[in-house]
Image (cartoon, rainbow, N blue to C red):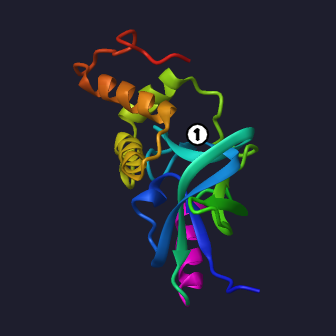
Amino acid sequence: MGERRLWVFGYGSLLWNPGFEHDDREIARLCGYARSFCMWSIHHRGTRERPGLVLALDAQRGACCDGLAFRVVPGGEAAALAGLRERELISAAYLEKTVTVRLADGRRVDAVTFVVDPGHAQYCADLSAERQAQVIARARGGRGPNAEYLHNTVEHLRALGIRDDALERLAHRVRQIAGAAPGQSAVGTGALKE
């Protein structure tokens, strides 16, 4: 039997800020889940008074999500998991799960990732694309503007050669809203389809 190593699957902010030491990173696909702005952010990209939105893996039959699998350096497993849990489980809206991902070279590895708890109060899968854009354009949390989170994700996915059309459209719409004059609504100026 081969060496057991800890892999972590990232699909949002982990793409550009994993926060742990790794000695390999590979494009990977996880099936059975979709990357979606389906979770209210009340800490990192919003506040309790003005929540933002963050990406989560939402269980969906037939869906697949492309991201990165990171192989944690030997001996760094405990620190990596502790850091990830502190960051991702801040409000218990994510569930830690071990999933099987397929790497770009065809290998399959088990990886730790964080999926949304559909029973949690922060779960919000029913928001229209336009509502998502309006929220993301205006929210800000402890780690900065919500729009920055969206744009960083889109840019890093592009750099990896991963296309996510829904996120591309959302990023375009958020830029439109940000370009509107203060106090003026950008709704109706090329709004996203719901």
Foreground residue, 2 or 51? Answer: 2
* Three-letter code, disc 1: Ser
Q: Residue furthest left?
A: 181
**Residue at the spot of label 1:** 36
Please provide the residue range marked out in magenta: 75-89
- Residue 64 x, y percent position in the rendering: 65, 44
Foreground residue, 32 or 91? Answer: 32
- Residue 170 x, y percent position in the rendering: 44, 30
Q: Residue at x 63, y 62 (%)?
A: 106
Q: Residue at x 76, y 44 (%)?
A: 119
Main secondary-structure element of the magenta-colored stretch: helix
Compared with residue 12, is residue 85 higher up or lower down, i.e. above or below?
A: below
Compared with residue 1, is residue 113 higher up or lower down, i.e. above or below?
A: above
- Residue 35 x, y percent position in the rendering: 59, 43
Q: Residue at x 57, y 63 (%)?
A: 105
Compared with residue 11, is residue 150 higher up or lower down, i.e. above or below?
A: above
Q: Residue furthest top?
A: 188
Foreground residue, 49 or 60? Answer: 60
Q: Judge left or right: residue 43 versus residue 176.
A: right
Neighbourhood count class around disc 1 (C-alpha, 10 Å): few under 14, some 14–19, many 20 upward: many
Q: Judge left or right: residue 80 versus residue 186.
A: right
